[in-house]
Amino acid sequence: DIVVTQSPDSLAVSLGERATINCKSSQSVFSSSYNKNYLAWYQQKLGQPPELLIYWASTRESGVPDRFSGSGSGTDFTLTISSLQAEDVAVYYCQQYYSTPPTFGQGTKVEIK
Amino acid sequence: EVQLVESGGGLVQPGGSLRLSCGASGFTFSSYWMHWVRQAPGKGLIWVSRLNNDGSDTSYADSVKGRFTISRDNAKNTLFLQMNSLRAEDTAVYYCARGRGMATILPVWGQGTLVSVSS
């Protein structure tokens, strides 16, 4: 199985400041055949199901604010929240879907400083 | 409105069985691959199983293989997860989720149903 590791485990950022979450996979999730990285990001607020933010490493899901962006390729990826808002307090997960079973990172908790 | 609603969770003794259901509405259920993902209390997300759109192809996490069975009734817009030989470590909120194409991209999730395995 591909192991996905996020850093940090938790993050406290002031309102309006940038938040950066890293995600590393134990093997490449890039497909040269399709020229795509099989990596998604989800946001989970307390007591709610996860919500898809980003897929193919950098494609924003419809309706997701543009302050959320994804980048990276191969084994190293980043989710950036450009200007943290109060409603962004949540746990964020990256997930690879390059191979079965799809696997999630352990999660990164984002709080307000 | 696209919606998934899980049901069937509850308290069960170790070794027991439970059948989860996930009712779908607001989209053409028979066109989509469907998944189950679970989350133990205070823990992260774990993919459990997936089923293709016509029910002919399944996949399972190693931790549930041979004990859980995923199925669907496209006429009733319902996804199922039959869980047998339950263990304490199966305790979790179980979410059903709709896939995007054949990739395990999950844009639609239900609210989840809690399964507790305890004596």
Image (tube, coloured by chain):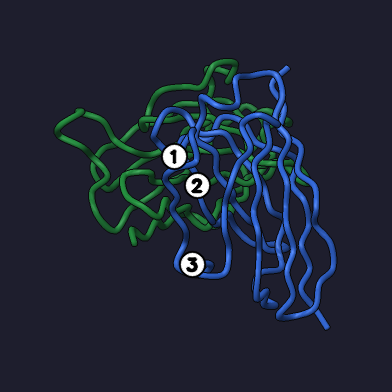
Chain colours: A green, B blue
Q: Are marks 1 and 3 in contact (CB under 8 Å)?
A: no
Q: Which residue is drawn at 33% across and 58% down?
A: A2
In the displayed structure, does residue A21 sit left or right of residue A2?
right
When the figure is inspected, residue B24 is found, relative to residue A111, above or below; the finding is above
Kind of residue indicated by mark 1: Thr
Q: Disc 2 or 1, which lies upstream in sequence?
A: 2
Q: Count of labels shown?
A: 3
In the displayed structure, does residue A20 sit left or right of residue B2?
left
Q: Residue at x 62, y 50 (%)?
A: A109
Label placed on residue B50: 2
Badge 3 density bin: few <14, some 14–19, many ≥20, Cα 10 Å? few
Label placed on residue B104: 1
Chain of the residue on which disc 1 is drawn: B
Q: Position of residue A1 (x, y in %)?
A: 34, 62
Q: Position of residue A34 (x, y in %)?
A: 20, 28
Viewer-side residue, B30 vs A17: B30
When the figure is inspected, residue A113 is found, relative to residue B39, above or below; the finding is above
- What residue occupies the far front of the structure in this picture? B75
Q: Which residue is drawn at 73% across and 46% down?
A: B21
Q: What element carries label 3?
A: loop
Q: Are marks 2 and 1 in contact (CB under 8 Å)?
A: yes
Badge 1 density bin: few <14, some 14–19, many ≥20, Cα 10 Å? many
Kind of residue indicated by mark 2: Arg
